[in-house]
Amino acid sequence: MQNRRSEQIRGSEQIRGSEQIRTEARLDLIRGSAARRRHDARTIAALTRNPGCNRRAVLDAAGVDKDGLSRHIGFAAPFGQSQFAIIRGNAFEARVRNDGGTDLLRLLADCLGFDLGPAGSPGVTVLDLGASAEQDGGVRPAAENLADRLDRTVTALRPDPHGIVLVAHPLLALPVGGQDVHLEPDLLVIRPDGQFHVVEIKSFPVVDGQADGEKVAAAAVQAAVYVLALRRMLRAREVVPTVPMMPVVPPATVSHDVVLVCPRDFSNAPLATRVDVRRQLLGLEHQLTRLATIEALLDDLPADLTFDLAAGPDGAPTRPATELTTGLDLLDARYTPDCLSTCELAFRCRHEAAGRTAALGASVREDLGGIDTVTEALDLAHGTRAPAEDQAEAAERLRITARMYAEALAGASHPPGGADG
Amino acid sequence: MSAISSYARALAAATGTAAPIATVRHVHLSERPLVLVPLTLAGEANAPLAALVGTRQADPTLLVVPQPRNRDLRFAFAADLAEIVLPHVLGFAADAEELANGPRAHDAPQLILPNPAGLAFLRLFGRSTRFRATDGDYAVPPSVPLLGRWLTFFAERAEIPGSSLARAVTDLLSLHWATGQSALEDANLAAAMGWIDPPPGRDGPTSARLAEDPAHSPPAGPTTDPGFDNDILAPAIAAYDAVTDPAALPTVLARLRDVLRGQLQPTWDLVWRALDLLRQLPPGASVAGRWETDRARYTGFHTYMAEEGLPQARLDGAVAAARRLNRIEQAQSAYDAERAFDDPLVMADHRVTGEAFQGTVLAVDRDRRVPNGRGKGRLVTRPLLTVRTEDPVRLTLGTRVVASSRRKQECLIVAIDTPGGDDGLTGAGAGTGTGADGGRSATGATLITLEAQSGMGRSAAPAPGSVPEAGETLCYSAVLADGVRSVAMPDAADTPWTHGGPPEPYEPNERDTAEAWD
Ligand code: SF4
């Protein structure tokens, strides 16, 4: 029974058959000899923040090391992590998972409002599905290892009508742009009534009930990615004509309420907070459907396109950087300032986007009437270019803005200047 | 963003140097600001790592926490910081004038941080120190909780629009200049300064790119560069941790201080350079009034600390939170209105959107008197002005407007006369922008009739000069402070240090002082 379920999940991969194999081969070629970078919830969140960017979509699907690539072409992005942050993160997670998770269970029970029964009661099952293999550098673990964990997870995704199930280190699969990507949430709680909750352990502090808004937002999107993946996996499993084995098992549903476990105030004591990620789910689902399928994107690319850095014996890239930038030029980018905090290629794409109003920010572009380039916007503003038909309104507004700007500066009693003014 | 600032960004991007978006300075600058550049340890909850602090660029004090995970060392840092901050902050209270509802200091301390993240550090550091107990298990010097309460006061004031008591330099810069990069990139102090005041021989984009390289220009904190953490700081802290022989300590400490100063000094210098730049702008007319409010709040809090001195509660209650929000909205609306009146470049934004217009007075009916509407047959003076403007006015009849040069006089729009069938600029000349005035008047001008409501004195005829004359050029704005605005002292019913009544009653409790730290 259990095996059949997991086969079903993997079976869906096989059905795609030769098409899929061809795509995989193309992606392998694009990546070249380097180890594959794996998608995770963070990269999916980033991808869905800029769904129109084909460059990122292709490179991520192929598992290209964008960091190494940008470094080699002279646009290294500052995405380093401080070892202090890593140490604190690990220490906090260890503390949370400490003593078999009894403290954690109590926190979760309080937070989610379920009854735990007396401490250490047999009503709690803790399943650890294997250690995370991707924390150090994103190297992909051996294939069977992944498949095994996926199997084990599928098996474990089942409520126990007699108690709580706590699943540590599960492995989830989610199709993104037609490719399955694997995800590792920290924890899942499965309640006897069939409700699943995603639990994320984060090491940013919650002080007096408040945390850094950006970090909470990022954590919520990541958790939403897991919720989505879980829902799809459970749905896929339902299709299997099951042998009625445990008729008492309630139907499994994945709650949109996730739990963030963070340090409280200035301590290391964990605090669980329930977060509703319905809004994030809506956004994600919408953006995921907008992602072009990788196959379609690959069709337009030369068959021999590769971003292989051709690492020499010492590990240093030997491929001429110009070849790589020529390759990048074939992939349409859609740079926005947001990329600076989400994508390793940001400096390169920003360089290409110089002179575009979008590089100044979406709202600036909008204020400039949606005109594409800075030069064109200014020419329209200064009346040195005749507006196209659909630009008439924007052009008039730009002209008014330019006139008022000039008037105000001219009228100022102390005209401001730069430093030398 | 706004039309003007986005246009200015485009200009800056095209020219490679920042474009002004203000003609006056909208913030008060102290002659002796207390500048604080803090650094924290990555990953930890607001654990101070180091700071440069002082009131003169030439001699900052460097404070270092050699092992930021050590609780005692953190509080030793707090005590050291208190020794610098408290005398400065408290020192302004002695020189005060006596007003009906209490004293008000002639000047007040001003705290300057590099960026909003620095202000957030201030708030959290205030939070982590203001409840500390001065006796018992984890006793700290009395100056530590005192510092915490003052830092909390500054951090709270920093959230009030228009207050100058604690400000972030990057915010001040983007209030006055538009760079040719995105707002997100402006959060990097060195990059923003690269656009506004590039070193000789470099343009904005080049300096901004250099500024993003942590090897060339360390981040302005409080978060440190991960490369610095991993390659330099971690070994230096490990060396400190490994010291067993006290004789080795000075060398190890000197090394730590050295590397941390190296990270802090460039930001320190940038902050002072930015302040110098801002100082070159003349202050806006309303700046002194807002600073007066700041001085009153400062003095009030000083009195409160002397008389009661309990720490601010961990959380605002519902009522206090609502009141606070309301206060922020009021301050924002007053601040927006004042900034536009002070500065034609800010007003230009409202003119683009049609909420303000500049024009020439064509005709004045100065002595017009109308029944006061209360049915006793009494007449009030209500002069009518006809103003001709070429601005794209988008105001409706009955809107209240005030002229920037006559702020005490409120007017009502009683008629708007747009030349009939005007469908915008047409014809060959339209594309080339402003022609001679005479040439344009036939096409775009709007005639607006205003009824002056106030500001004409008490007698039947308007006081001399209190009504605009024909030929005068004025700029009227509908962006006004909502409700009654008073930049002077708050009502006597209010406690001086907040506008909305006495501070939340605070009950000291075990939980706050015995808070877990490990
Ligand atoms: S940085 Fe470039 S590749 Fe990355 S998301 Fe932005 S546009 Fe796409």
Image: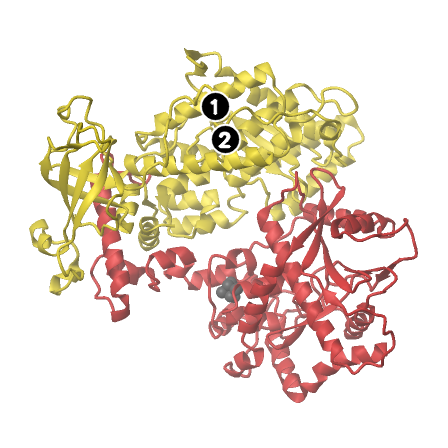
Chain colours: A red, B yellow
Compared across the picture, whether A288 is left or right of B95 comes to right
Chain for disc number 2: B
User: In this figure, which residue is indicated by the disc labeled 2?
Assistant: B157
Residue at 56% x, 78% y: name it. Answer: A293
Residue B367 against residue A211 in the figure, above or below: above
User: Is B51 on the left-hand or right-hand side of A349?
Assistant: right
Mark 1 or mark 2, earlier in chain: 2
Few, some or many C-alpha atoms within 10 Å of disc 2 (few <14, some 14-19, many ≥20)? many
Residue occupying image coordinates x 60% and y 24%: B147
Q: Nearer the viewer, residue A182 or B447?
A: B447
Residue B379 drawn above or below residue B428: above
Image point 60% across, 53% down: which residue? A217
Q: Nearer the viewer, residue A252 or A289?
A: A252
**Position of residue A135 measured from the top left corner of the image (x, y, whole percent):** 72, 59
Q: Position of residue A318 (x, y in %)?
A: 59, 69
Labels 1 & 2 near each other (Cβ < 8 A):
yes
- Residue B423 is drawn in which quadrant? bottom left
What secondary structure is marked by label 2? helix
Residue B124 as seen in the image, left or right of residue A235: left
Mark 1: few/some/many CA within 10 Å (<14, 14-19, 20+):
many
Q: Amino acid at mark 1?
A: Arg
Viewer-proximal residue among B2 and B395: B395
Q: Which residue is mark 1?
A: B297
Q: CA distance from mark 1 to mark 2?
A: 9 Å
Element type at mark 1: helix
Q: Chain of mark 1?
A: B
Where in the figure is residue A83, as x and y percent of width and height? Answer: 69, 48
Q: Determine the image quadrant of residue B286.
A: top left
Q: How many marks?
A: 2
Question: Where, quadrant-wise, is the C terminus of chain B in this rendering?
Answer: top right
